[in-house]
Amino acid sequence: MRKGFTLPELVVVLVIVGVILALAAPRLAGWLDWLAVDRAAEEIAAFHRTARFAAIMRSQRVRLDFSDDSLRATLEGPVESVFVRWPGPARHGVSLTASRPTIRFQANGLGLGAADTKLVLRRGAEAESLTTSLLGRLKRWP
């Protein structure tokens, strides 16, 4: 006597697996969008903290430039120099909309013209907002 599965049994199992995957795929896509937006928001928050800390540690004004493809922090002074450049949220398939694409930190870490700057990250149906305060802090709004 041989042990194994018959062709009808295999077809039934494959049909059941296909139905389950078809039902789960839309939820999986939404979950992947949420993960990408969350990761992009974390990266922008880390970039923001790094640049603000650099302004304080170097006692120098810092300019932050936000775009889909890059995040750039520049030390301002007689000679400007880019000291941090990170890939933007586009590498995760996330779009970035900024009310102001450039903000600055004073040498003491306070925001300079950064109050109420809103960064909106979107992918699919998922979106998250980041807002800077008058003091230069960043707040995440899921």
Image (cartoon, grey):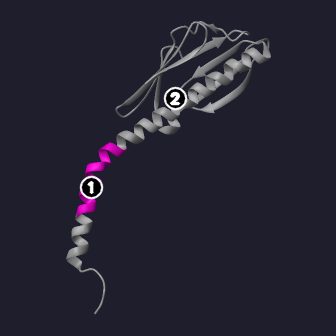
| Disc 1 packing (10 Å; few <14; some 14–19; many ≥20) | few
Residue that protrudes farthest toward the bottom in the picture: 1
* Magenta-colored span: 16-28
Residue designated by label 2: 41
Q: Quadrant of the N terminus?
A: bottom left
Residue designated by label 1: 20
Image side of residue 97 versus residue 53, left or right: left
Q: Residue at x 59, y 14 (%)?
A: 137
- On the image, which quarter does residue 7 sit in? bottom left
x%, y% of residue 62? 70, 15
The count of marks equals 2
Q: Looking at numbered disc 2 in the image, what kind of residue is underneath it?
A: Ala
Image side of residue 53 versus residue 139, left or right: right
Q: Looking at numbered disc 1 in the image, what kind of residue is underneath it?
A: Ile
- On the image, which quarter does residue 8 sit in? bottom left
SS at mark 1? helix
Q: Main secondary structure of the magenta part?
A: helix
Q: Residue at x 61, y 8 (%)?
A: 135
Image side of residue 122 versus residue 21, left or right: right
